[in-house]
Amino acid sequence: MKNSNFKLPTILIAMTLFIGTFTSCSDDDGPTVNITVNEGPSGDIGGDFTGNGGNGSRIINWTNNLTTADYNADITATVSGKFQIIVADANGAIVLDRTLNGGTEPDSIDGVTGAGKPGNWTVTITLTSFNGDGSYSLSEGD
């Protein structure tokens, strides 16, 4: 009798583990975003971003020894959503605030930020309901 009582719980546990292994939920199915950061030569920074309808942001601390920065951003294969880049100087003053909307032109931006105080700058990349991919880069200005 003790043997039969032991087998039933063991079988139920084994079945639960087996079924759970093959039917577990995955976060990969929901909206996500991914934002990478790469440092280049002479303090340049840039990266790539992707999204499948998700929201997210990344704050990057960047040392800019000059008063301006050159910037570039490009979105590709985007059908909806928004990409935003905000750059603040060492005093926290915003020297750039640009947005690209998916599915419309323009699909790229470039130029020079406003003048700011050299030092530790902050770059904030925000993706909102973003579907697609793209890239961005910043380098010390003239």
Image (cartoon, grey):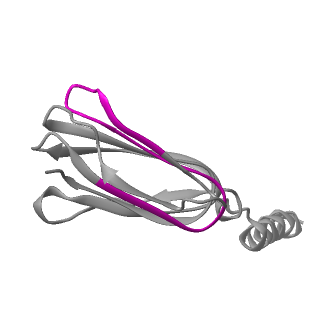
User: Residue 114 lies in magenta, yes or no?
Assistant: no
Residue placed most toward the observer, 105 or 59: 105
Left or right: 103 as drawn, with respect to 58: right
Residue placed most toward the observer, 25 or 68: 68
Q: Position of residue 74 (x, y in %)?
A: 46, 63
Q: Position of residue 113 (x, y in %)?
A: 29, 43
Q: Residue at x 80, y 71 (%)?
A: 19
Q: Is residue 84 above or below residue 93?
A: below
Left or right: 130 as drawn, with respect to 111: right
Range shown magenta? 71-98
Q: Magenta region's main secondary structure? A: strand
Q: Position of residue 122 (x, y in %)?
A: 29, 39
- Quadrant of the image containing the N terminus: bottom right
Q: Quadrant of residue 3?
A: bottom right
Q: Residue at x 23, y 48 (%)?
A: 69
Q: Quadrant of residue 11?
A: bottom right
